[in-house]
Structure formats: C-alpha cells, structure tokens
Image (cartoon, grey):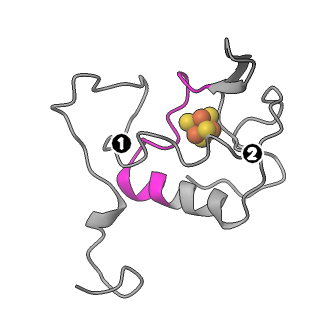
Amino acid sequence: MEPKDSTANEAFKGFTNSDCPFYPCHQGVKRAFNCLFCYCPLSAFDCPGPYKAFTSKNGVRRKDCSACTLPHDGHTQSWAFIQKWLAQPVLWDGGEQTRPWPRESENAKD
Ligand code: SF4
C-alpha cells in the first residue's frame, strides 16, 4: 500500500454510505456526500461552519452543527477543508459563531 502522499488514488478522501439510516443527515450537500467526517474532527476546534452554540444538560458548551455541510460536500473538497483547518488547530472557546465561511481574510476556494 502506498503512502497517501504519493498515491494517485484518492479513494481515502471519502466515501458515501447511502445505506446509513440517517443518510442524508445534512441537507444542501451539492457534491458527492462524504461520510468520512461523520463525527466532525473540528468539533472541539475553531471552525468556519454555521454552528449554533448551546450548553448541554451537563453544563458543557457544545456545537449544534445541523446546518453545516462543510465536512460532507464533495469527497476531495471536504477532505481539503478538514486538512486545512486541522493544520493549525485552535481550541474552540465555546462561543457563538461570529465569522462563518467564507471568512473575508482567507482565500476560500472550496
Ligand atoms: S460547524 Fe461544521 S465544520 Fe464546524 S465543527 Fe460543526 S460540522 Fe465541523
């Protein structure tokens, strides 16, 4: 098996499980639905998604990501999005989303 950095096969970037009982779990996905990031790796980090913050019954700040399609919209596109935001992760401070995607200071191509 080749390391992912040298292979031309991009299958590792995503898959679609259309047999999942929750599929499609997010509305508005235009490209191939990527189920790889079903549990978003950015849940604990600052992200540009349109989440709503809330406090759980245990007093923990959480994100409601129901309206977000960023980890799912296109296998290669969502892979690139997650890699970009995990490259320099910043812990989420529990606050509301004030700078949703695309952020003016960044070059958002996806
Ligand atoms: S808002 Fe989107 S990108 Fe951010 S943590 Fe939730 S699902 Fe991930």
Secondary structure of the residue carrying numbered label 1: loop
Residue shown at 15%/31% (left/top)?
A: 19
Image height of 94 relative to 76, above or below: above
Label 2 CB-ligand 1 distance < 8 A: no
Q: Tell which of 64 and 62 is nearer to you.
A: 62
Q: Residues within 10 Å of mark 2 (few under 14, many from 20)?
A: some
Q: Residues within 10 Å of mark 1 (few under 14, many from 20)?
A: few
The residue that label 2 is drawn on is 46
**Which quarter is ligand 1 in?**
top right
Which residues are drawn in magenta?
64-79
The residue that label 1 is drawn on is 31
Q: Which residue appears farthest toward the front when viewing the image?
A: 58
Residue 44 rendering spot, x and y as whole percentages: 67, 43
Residue 43 rendering spot, x and y as whole percentages: 62, 40
The three-letter amino acid code for the residue at tag 2 is Asp
Provide the major secondary structure of the magenta segment. loop
Q: Which residue appears farthest toward the left when viewing the image?
A: 19
Image height of 94 relative to 88, above or below: above
Residue 77 rendering spot, x and y as whole percentages: 46, 55
Residue 23 rendering spot, x and y as whole percentages: 27, 26
First-in-chain label (2 vs 1) = 1
Q: Is 76 contained in the magenta span? A: yes
* Spatial separation of the CA atoms under disc 2 and disc 1: 24 Å
Residue 10 located left or right of residue 82: left
Image height of 69 relative to 110, above or below: above
Residue shown at 29%/81% (left/top)?
A: 8
Q: Quadrant of residue 67?
A: top right
The three-letter amino acid code for the residue at tag 1 is Arg
